[in-house]
Amino acid sequence: MTEDKFWEIIELSWADSPALHKLRAECLKNNDAEILEQLSDELQGSILKNYNKRLLELNKEDITKFILILEERLYNIDREEIHEYTDGSDDGFYTPVALYLEWDENIII
């Protein structure tokens, strides 16, 4: 499992739900809070099912590496300067990891 493969799994999982994929692309352009909230809700539905389908195909080593990459991405956005703009996270999970490949790449300094 490479970081490129990690992001490929995420991108393909969104592509499996074309209407949500299109909505996600719109949100990436305009950062609309209402769309973001709608997409966040959808993550727990069809998008999560898409992830599960792909992750079940991985062997133990790759799923372990996937989890480690995910943990690193979450750690990278769980910084004080990020919380200033996002008001933190009450549930301990940030939607942007699953939602924003471009956003994530832009904030890693």
Image (spheres, rainbow, N blue to C red):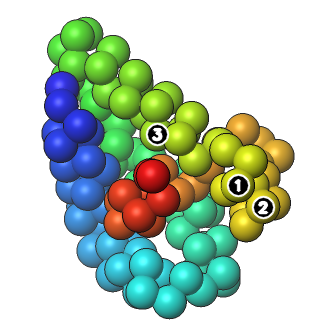
Say which quadrant the N terminus sits in.
top left
User: At x 45% / y 52%, what residue is drawn?
Assistant: 109
Q: CA distance from mark 1 to mark 3?
A: 15 Å
State yes or no: discs 2 and 1 in contact (Cβ < 8 Å). Answer: yes
Local SS, label 2: helix
Q: Residue furthest top?
A: 60
**Toward which corner of the image does residue 105 lie, by quadrant?**
bottom left
Question: Is 81 situated left or right of 35 in this image?
Answer: right
Q: Amino acid at mark 1?
A: Glu
Q: Amino acid at mark 3?
A: Arg
Q: Amino acid at mark 2?
A: Glu
| In-front residue for pair 10/82 | 82
Question: Is 74 situated left or right of 52 in this image?
Answer: right
Residue of label 1: 81
**Toward which corner of the image does residue 82 lie, by quadrant?**
bottom right
Q: CA distance from mark 2 to mark 3?
A: 18 Å
Local SS, label 3: helix
Where residue 96 sits in the image (x, y, percent)? 52, 57
Where residue 54 sits in the image (x, y, percent)? 24, 37
| In-front residue for pair 98/72 | 72
Residue of label 3: 73
Residue of label 2: 84
